Image (tube, rainbow, N blue to C red):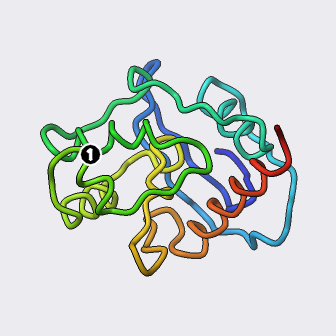
Amino acid sequence: MLISQIGELEIRGEGDKLVSLTLVSKRNSNNPSLISGSENVFTGWLISYFNGKERKQMNEVNFLIPFKGKTREILLELLRVGYGEIVTYGELAKRINTSPRVVGNAMSRNPLPIFIPCHRVVRVNDIGNYSLGGKETKKWLLEFEERNLKLKP
């Protein structure tokens, strides 16, 4: 378990691979509490991320992604979307020759939000939904990354 600005996160792994990240309980994102949790490579990365220090994505070798085909391809393509970068469902779909709807379906099945940054994918005219705490959490993560980019060179 990890306590963060967005809430209490459960991180599950199998051996040295990350399997899932879920939001157990939501917090008031206006309450900037201390981030805490027992440290391993995954919680350490998240602690660093929530402290505004981690901007590099983890490598796909760190994850157990239970999908094949387009869903897997889309999730792996997300690892190329940089910190603070925002892309639309359509832009991501073009990168891998599929439809925005297929991209949206893959986003909703992402077992590793934040690590595989589906919060950085938005609709053309709306922020879109987010499986880890809804639109409010997605908006907070995007604004958090934008603020951190402005604070550090």
Residue at 61 percent across and 52 percent down: it is 9
Q: Label 1: how many residues lie within 10 Å, few (<14), some (14-19) or many (20+)?
A: few
Q: Is residue 123 left or right of residue 127?
A: left
Residue at 28 percent across and 64 percent down: it is 104
On screen, residue 2 above or below 14: below
Q: Position of residue 101 (x, y in %)?
A: 20, 67
Question: In which quadrant is the N terminus drawn?
Answer: top right
Question: Which residue position holds label 1?
Answer: 95
SS label for mark 1 = helix
Q: Position of residue 114 (x, y in %)?
A: 53, 48
**Residue 54 in which image quadrant:** top right
On screen, residue 48 above or below 6: above
Residue at 12 percent across and 39 percent down: it is 69
Q: Is residue 6 left or right of residue 148?
A: left
Question: In which quadrant is the C terminus drawn?
Answer: top right
Q: Position of residue 118 (x, y in %)?
A: 44, 54
Q: Is residue 4 left or right of residue 67?
A: right
